[in-house]
Image (cartoon, helix red, strand yellow):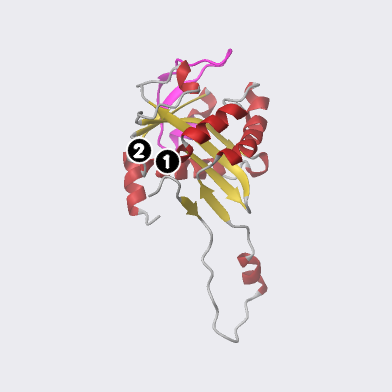
Amino acid sequence: MSMQSILSLKPETLSLPPGISESPSCQRRHTLPASEFRCLTPEDAVSMFEIEREAFISVSGACPLDLAEIRHFLTLCPELSLGWFEEGNLVAFVIGSLWDKERLTQESLTLHRPGGRVAHLHVLAVHRTFRQQGKGSVLLWRYLQHLGSLWAVRRAVLMCEHALVPFYEKSGFQAVGPCAVTVGSLAFTELRCSLRSHSFLRRNSGC
């Protein structure tokens, strides 16, 4: 799989035999908005930052990445990002970088280590209009499948507040203890996920 490959969910169009018209319900179904997953580019940075800012400012008072840092990572490692688009509009995204140490440190917040074997997930955010619909879980699953296709990446790691630990555990992450990274007065739990099973699923899913 190419680093920049696009994973599309567009439905296949089926043709009816001559003389048979579609029912109104079928016609409506064919006009539903198409969904698309793809790696992101620096041109997507502003849309990403708007979603991130709205999602995080009200909760923690700060964004994990500022606009310049988003552009920085999308320039260095766009293949470690994934966006979900509806009708061409970004509705959710995840962005990461490579890390080369066993545990996260303060440096891991802003650095990309090209020789690293660990994907550090910096941000997963969903547009407010599309929350409470399961999109975060679906996007995370697709992202892990994508990482599983990158042979240099062996593990995914992230840090989150304690209340979010169950969400990530449902996707296969395991808590490894308190994270050494702090942001102001906020403390985090560090979690990791082996990509071996996701790589197997990817190779056998037909995607």
Q: Name the disc covering residue 49, or none.
A: none
Picture coordinates of residue 14, whole percent (x, y): 53, 73
* Picture quadrant of residue 114: top left
Q: Is residue 140 magenta?
A: no
Residue 73 at what x, y percent from top left? 51, 31
Q: Is tag 1's residue or tag 2's residue first in the polypeptide sequence?
A: 1
Q: In this figure, which residue is indicated by the disc labeled 1?
A: 144
Q: Is residue 108 left or right of residue 205?
A: right
Inspect the image, locate mark 1, and give the three-letter code of the amino acid beneath it.
Answer: Leu
Q: Residue furthest bottom?
A: 19
Q: Which residue is mark 2?
A: 195
In this image, 105 relative to 26: left or right? left
Q: In this rendering, would 162 be left or right of 203?
A: right
Q: Taking 7 as reference, is 115 above or below it?
A: above
Secondary element at tag 1: helix
- Amino acid at pointer 2: Leu
Q: Residue at position x 57%, y 25% from top?
A: 64
Q: Residue at x 35, y 35 (%)?
A: 153
State the residue at coordinates (60%, 45%): 133
**SS for dot 2:** loop
Would you say the residues marked 1 and 2 are in contact, meaning their CB atoms lie under 8 Å apart? yes
Where residue 173 appears, as percent x and y from the top left, is 41, 32
Magenta part of the chain: 166-191
Considering only vertical position in the picture, is 33 above or below 45? below
Q: Residues within 10 Å of mark 2 (few under 14, many from 20)?
A: many
Which quarter of the image is occupied by the C terminus? bottom left
Camera-side residue: 198 or 150?
150
The residue at the point 62 percent across, 71 percent down is 26
Q: CA distance from mark 1 to mark 2?
A: 7 Å
Query: Which of the two residues, 96 or 173, is positioned nearer the viewer here?
Result: 96
Q: Quadrant of residue 65?
A: top right
The magenta stretch spans residue 187: yes
